Image: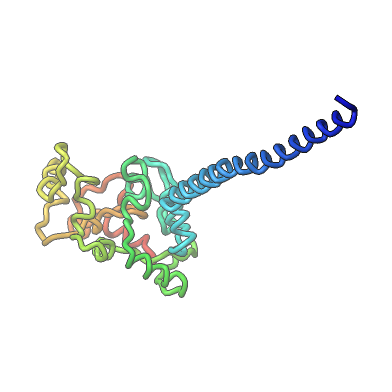
């Protein structure tokens, strides 16, 4: 082979090598896209999961729709069975007297959304009220403003269920066999008390008449009956009225 032929052959090989390299480059670049898409998907899933966890916490409710709720958050964040404060800034002998605390300690009812199950109609209304400032508040003794208290009638209105079913259901308060507790079951559960609070000699009452979430629960019977038992962390009817803001 002559020198000229050798040069021609070497040039052809170089050209072929450059051509194959240029063809391979786009293929290599294309292979990066699945990796990028995968990373983006993982990030979005992680962000969505984090947002959903936040969505179930008091800080979300306080930041997005319900303002101001800092005093409510303070009650929720406390440990169970210790001295603490209620949403009005009052001292309570035991945080077990507040359902927000005891429910948080129960893994099956550990978030706000366990009890406050929002309906679309409620979310729209509350969102509009938050934007316009159209919500009622009361001033606590510490000077803080908190939303007015809502009873079971209000909490269940948008759900189309009886106030009693809000608490007495298979997921919350059930019998050992898994069936929802009834009023009769409650009467039997507290039959050993000197004055059974679940008997209703004066007509039907709501659970929220006594059981409070973000302030000390109240034995409503003590309004008339001085011998009514006051559990630790609870208040008598008279004391409850004295600590509530006017």
Residue at horizontal 37 percent and vertical 48 percent from the top: 111
Question: Is 8 or 108 nearer to us in this picture?
Answer: 8
- Whether residue 222 is visible, yes or no, is no
Question: Is 78 or 91 nearer to us in this picture?
Answer: 78
Tell me the quarter of the image containing the N terminus. top right
Residue at horizontal 17 percent and vertical 51 percent from the top: 197
Q: Position of residue 170 (x, y in %)?
A: 20, 45
- Whether residue 147 is visible, yes or no, is yes
Direction from residue 84 to residue 33 in the image, left or right: right
Residue at horizontal 19 percent and vertical 43 percent from the top: 174
Question: Is 47 or 232 nearer to us in this picture?
Answer: 47
Q: Position of residue 130 (x, y in %)?
A: 44, 69
Q: Position of residue 55 (x, y in %)?
A: 43, 53
Colouring: rainbow
Direction from residue 117 to residue 187 in the image, left or right: left
Q: Position of residue 188 (x, y in %)?
A: 11, 43
Vertical position of residue 203 compared to residue 98: above or below = below
Residue 138 placement: quadrant: bottom left
Q: How many callouts does the rendering have?
A: 0
Vertical position of residue 19 compared to residue 161: above or below = above
Residue at horizontal 58 percent and vertical 44 percent from the top: 33
Vertical position of residue 64 compared to residue 167: above or below = below
Tell me the quarter of the image containing the C terminus. bottom left
Vertical position of residue 85 compared to residue 177: above or below = below
């Amino acid at each position: 082979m002559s020198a000229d032929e050798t040069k021609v052959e070497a040039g052809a090989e170089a050209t072929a090598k450059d051509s194959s390299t240029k063809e391979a480059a786009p293929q290599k670049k294309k292979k990066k896209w699945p990796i990028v898409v995968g990373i983006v998907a993982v990030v979005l899933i992680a962000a969505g999961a984090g947002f959903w966890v936040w969505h179930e916490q008091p800080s979300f409710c306080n930041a997005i729709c319900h303002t101001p709720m800092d005093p409510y958050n303070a009650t929720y964040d406390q440990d169970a069975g210790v001295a603490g404060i209620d949403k009005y800034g009052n001292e309570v002998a035991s945080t077990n007297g507040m359902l927000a605390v005891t429910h948080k300690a129960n893994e099956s009812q550990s978030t706000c959304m366990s009890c406050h199950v929002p309906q679309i109609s409620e979310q729209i209304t509350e969102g509009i009220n938050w934007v316009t400032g159209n919500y009622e508040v009361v001033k606590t003794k510490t000077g803080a403003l908190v939303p007015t208290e809502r009873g079971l009638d209000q909490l269940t209105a948008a759900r189309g269920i009886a106030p009693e079913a809000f608490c007495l259901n298979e997921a919350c308060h059930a019998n050992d066999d898994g069936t929802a507790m009834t009023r009769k079951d409650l009467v039997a559960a507290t039959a050993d008390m000197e004055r059974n609070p679940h008997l209703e000699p004066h007509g039907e009452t709501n659970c929220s008449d006594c059981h409070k979430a973000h302030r000390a629960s109240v034995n409503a019977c003590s309004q008339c009956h001085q011998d009514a038992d006051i559990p630790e962390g609870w208040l008598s009817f008279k004391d409850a009225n004295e600590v509530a803001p006017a």
